[in-house]
């Protein structure tokens, strides 16, 4: 196997505690030909100071608001790697992630992107519900999105759509599929959900729902949309593994309740935004 440079791009904003854990995991990757690129959105805590302990490629991103997609694209343009891996500051890589991504993509030059499955962890009941929910998505192509890309394919696809706040990961994967194959590895990204509040979760889903029209408009011909947005399809997915679902019935019911709330408030955000445009 060749030893190509991999650029790991992390958009940040006031996330020093999570970022330190994320960077520590990157430093322990068995694959070492890595550059870390931090694109920081005007943090007022010590995020940039933490970042500089691990990399000298720390850039400040001046725009205000939710600009993760623009930060990621900016990072990709700064990258020197043949491949780019794009994660969030609350994500922690198991030690073989980069090695297995490189091994997989180098084995087949038709591969343009790689899915890395996620496993959630966090504090409290709702975090456990989120962990259970995510466990049903592993191996489900219409739910998972690629995070590791051949850089030229990423740039040719136009990167993340910067008009999107919701659905941008799915949108990019669909664009990458037009340029090559998307494959997967089995190593995990651990996603630190922290302490989840149900109220905060449904507020976030309402906000994302109000921004979801851009994804639907750009991908209206894609078959995945019905699966991704359909509540019945999602419930069928959950109930397709009854042993997992009923192993802890309280968690299972809590997960369904949380997911129902997310669908209701996400749908409300989408519909209200659409009605305002009429």
Image (spheres, rainbow, N blue to C red):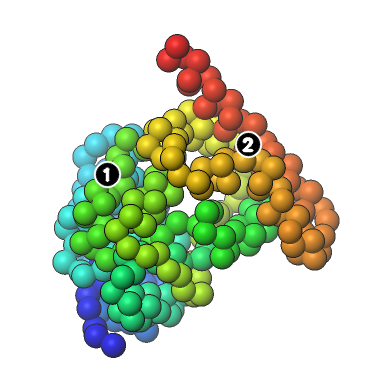
Q: From this viewpoint, is residue 233 visible?
A: yes
Q: Quadrant of residue 44?
A: top left
Q: In this view, does 85 lie to the left or right of 202?
A: left
Is the residue 144 above or below the residue 43 in the image? Answer: below
To which residue does mark 1 refer? 70
- Most foreground residue, 92 or 100: 100
| Between marks 2 and 1 in the image, the one whose residue lies nearer the viewer | 2
Q: Quadrant of the N terminus?
A: bottom left
x then y, percent, for residue 267: 58, 30
x then y, percent, for residue 256: 73, 46
- Most foreground residue, 173 or 13: 173
**Outermost residue toward the top in this view:** 278
Q: Contact (CB < 8 A) between labels 2 and 1?
A: no
What residue lies at 17% left-to-right and 55% top-to-bottom? 77
To which residue does mark 2 refer? 263
Q: In this view, does 88 lie to the left or right of 123?
A: left
Classed neighbour count for the residue bearing mark 2: other residues with Cα under 10 Å, few (<14), some (14–19), many (≥20): some
Local secondary structure at mark 1: helix
- Most foreground residue, 237 or 211: 237
What residue lies at 67% left-to-right and 36% top-to-bottom? 261
Q: Distance between the residues labelled 2 and 1?
A: 27 Å
Q: From this viewpoint, is residue 37 visible?
A: no
Q: In which quarter of the image is the C terminus?
A: top left
- Most foreground residue, 213 or 85: 213
x then y, percent, for residue 153: 25, 60
Is the residue 269 above or below the residue 189 in the image? Answer: above
């Amino acid at each position: 196997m060749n030893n190509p440079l991999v650029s790991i791009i992390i958009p940040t904003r006031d996330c020093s505690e999570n970022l330190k854990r994320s960077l520590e995991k990157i430093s322990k990757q068995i694959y070492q030909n890595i550059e870390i690129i931090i694109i920081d959105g005007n943090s007022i805590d010590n995020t940039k100071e933490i970042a500089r302990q691990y990399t000298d490629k720390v850039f400040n991103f001046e725009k205000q608001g939710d600009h993760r997609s623009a930060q990621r694209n900016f990072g990709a343009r700064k990258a020197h790697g043949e491949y780019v891996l794009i994660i969030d500051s609350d994500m922690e890589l198991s030690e073989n992630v980069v090695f297995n991504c490189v091994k997989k993509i180098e084995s087949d030059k038709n591969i343009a992107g790689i899915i890395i499955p996620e496993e959630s962890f966090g504090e409290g009941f709702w975090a456990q519900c989120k962990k259970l929910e995510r466990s049903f998505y592993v191996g489900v192509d219409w739910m998972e999105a690629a995070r590791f890309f051949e850089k030229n394919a990423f740039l040719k696809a136009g990167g993340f759509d910067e008009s999107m706040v919701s659905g941008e990961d799915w949108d990019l994967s669909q664009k990458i599929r037009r340029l090559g194959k998307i494959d997967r590895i089995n190593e995990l990204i651990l996603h630190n959900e922290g302490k989840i509040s149900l109220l905060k979760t449904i507020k976030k889903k309402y906000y994302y729902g109000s921004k979801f029209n851009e994804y639907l408009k750009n991908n209206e011909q894609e078959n995945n949309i019905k699966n991704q947005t359909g509540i019945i399809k999602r419930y069928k997915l959950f109930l397709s593994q009854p042993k997992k679902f009923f192993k802890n019935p309280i968690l299972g019911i809590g997960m369904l309740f949380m997911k129902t709330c997310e669908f209701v408030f996400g749908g409300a955000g989408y519909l209200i935004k659409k009605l305002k445009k009429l």
